[in-house]
Image (spheres, rainbow, N blue to C red):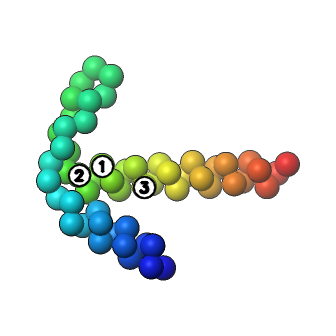
Amino acid sequence: MVLAVLTIWFIAVNTASVGIRLWVATVTLPLWAVLTVTLAVGLLMGALLARRRAKR
């Protein structure tokens, strides 16, 4: 619970725009959006790996 609150706080405080270079294009997004997408992808990958290990 504490980690979730700290994560939300960290994302909320970082509001500056950042440029992200994707292989060809460069995208400018708010840092909170980048952090949220990164968190979601990490949670999804962790869930998939845990499910895969549980089947073994």
Between the residue at mark 1 and the residue at mark 2, the CA separation in whole angstroms equals: 5 Å
Q: Residue at x 85, y 48 (%)?
A: 56
Residue carrying label 1: 34
Q: Are marks 1 and 2 in contact (CB under 8 Å)?
A: yes
Residue at 19% over, 51% down: 30
For the point 21% across and 60% down, which residue is it?
14
Q: Amino acid at mark 2?
A: Leu
Secondary structure under tag 2 reads: helix
Marks 3 and 1 sit apart, C-alpha to C-alpha, by 9 Å
Which residue is found at the position 64% from the left and 49% from the top? 48
Other-residue count near label 2 (Cα within 10 Å), few / some / many at <14 / 14–19 / ≥20: some
Name the residue tied to disc 3. 39
Residue 16 vertical position relative to residue 7 in the rendered view, above or below: above
Q: Judge left or right: residue 52 versus residue 10.
A: right
Judge the density around disc 3: few (<14), some (14-19), many (≥20) Cα neighbours within 10 Å.
some
- x, y (%) of residue 27? 21, 34
Q: Is residue 3 left or right of residue 56?
A: left
- Is tag 3's residue or tag 1's residue first in the polypeptide sequence? 1
Residue 25 lies, in percent from the top left, at: 24, 24
Identify the mark nearer the N-term, 2 or 3. 2
Which amino acid type corresponds to the residue marked 3 in the rendered image? Leu
Whether residue 12 is situated above or below residue 29 in the rendered picture: below
Task: Give the label on residue 31, or none.
Answer: 2
* Helix, strand or loop status at disc 3: helix
- Check disc 1 and give the amino acid type: Val
Q: CA distance from mark 2 to mark 3?
A: 12 Å
Question: For the view shown, which residue lies furthest in the top direction?
Answer: 24
